[in-house]
Every structure is written in structure tokens, then in C-alpha cells.
Amino acid sequence: MKAAVIVFPGSNCDRDVAVALEQVTGSPATMVWHAETDLDGFDLIVVPGGFSYGDYLRCGAMAAHSPIMRALVARAEAGTLVLGICNGFQILAEAGLLPGALMRNADLHFICKDVTLRVETQASPFTRDYRPRQVIRLPIAHNEGNYFADGHVLERLIAEDRVAFRYCSATGDIDDAANPNGSMRNIAGILNERRNVLGLMPHPERMADAALGGTDGRAIFTGILAALT
């Protein structure tokens, strides 16, 4: 499996995800600077977390217009797997690869803590290695993780089984108390129509090794590897 990790000015989780990918696949990921224009030959493209362009204007708005994004959009439309984590999710939404928008957290504070999530679908390369309705623990670290979309978009996401993860209680209940940022329907991650693009706010790369405190995020990377081999 050949993976690319896009690096923007302000990315700070690019090395973390590269380490997780190499641990799972046995092959080093290629770090691709945002000014490059070619992504041919990659099986997976990761848009990592961080604060691209210092979050100026709006999170992900400037990064969505970086030179590399034209190639990324073309590869996504051709079926290449694309994973956007935290700021990466924001960038993919700004680029139009995923519907909706990520707004300021409901309490207007930066949130950095572990949260529990419920896996809502196995029907994607990213979630195939989880059990149905499995409750997992992953960390979040964001100021703009409040997912918003128009009502008809939300209903379509749900009807098409494209909500990948939802914030939940430790017992799997979806309620306001388990929602850390105000996201509509407790949404933490979504898929595109072709199911080859996933955006999520929590950080699976930070829970992909027992030395980091847990391995609940590892299944995203093993699922991708299994889907591509």
C-alpha cells in the first residue's frame, strides 16, 4: 500500500499519522508538501490534523485552495481512498468533498480530551474492522468541531448510511450529554457518496499504539490496508 500524507503550513499531526501508517502497513508514508501538484500512484491520501495556515479566515478555507488540492480532488473522484482527520475533515468539507461545515464548538472553547464514539456503519474501507455499534475511545483536540448541515443533507447522510461515527456515552447512548461540541445528531465523522472519503474530528492516529494509551484507532488503518490488499 502506498500512502501520501499532505503537509500544509501549520499541520502538526502529519508525523503522527505517518507513524501509525508505517506501523500498520510496514511501509513508510510519503510526506507531500501542499505546493506539489501530483498525487498519482497513491492508494491512500491522508489530510492530517493541525492548524493549516493558522486557521486564518476559516478553518480549512485557505488549505482547500492549495495547489495539491486539485490533484487530491481528482484522485478522490477517481476512487482513491482519502482520510481527513480533524483539520483534514475541515479541509475536505471546504473543498466540497464532504457535505456540511465545521463550526465553532458550542461552548466557544478549545476542547482537548478523550471521547467515546459509536461506530455507525461497517460499510466502508475505514470502518470494516470495527464491530457494528462498537463503542470506542479516541481523543479530540479542536476549536471548530461542531458539525452542521442543512436538514435535507442530514437526512440523506442518515438514509444512505454515511454517518461513520457519532459521539456517545460509555454505554453507546446518543445524547446531548455525550456531545462535546454541539455537532448536529452527535456526528463525529461522515463518508462521501462513494464511501472512499472519510472525514472525522477525533484522532485515530493518537490511539493506534498501546504506548499511546489505547488502540481503538488502529482499526481504521488496518481496515484501509485490508481493503487495498
Image (cartoon, rainbow, N blue to C red):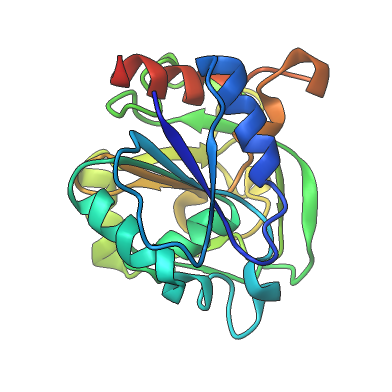
Q: Quadrant of residue 133?
A: top left
Q: Is residue 135 left or right of residue 209?
A: left
* 149 relative to 55 in the view: left or right: left
Q: Position of residue 210 (x, y in %)?
A: 76, 14
Q: Which residue: 48% across, 25% down? A: 220
User: In the rendering, at what x and y percent does residue 34 appear?
Assistant: 52, 63
Q: Quadrant of residue 140?
A: top right
223 up-or-down from 64: above or below: above
- Image coordinates of residue 136 in percent, x first then y, are 60, 24
Q: Quadrant of the C terminus?
A: top left
Q: Is residue 41 above or below residue 155?
A: above
Front position in the image: 26 or 210: 26
Q: Decide which of 171, 22 is in the foreground and name it.
A: 22
Note whether 38 is above or below 117 in the view shown: below
Res 191 visible: yes
The residue that appears at 50% across and 17% down in the rendered structure is 25
143 sits left or right of 87 in the view: right
For residue 202, above or below residue 11:
above
Quarter of the image containing the N terminus? Answer: top left
Is there any visible trace of residue 169 in the rendered image?
no
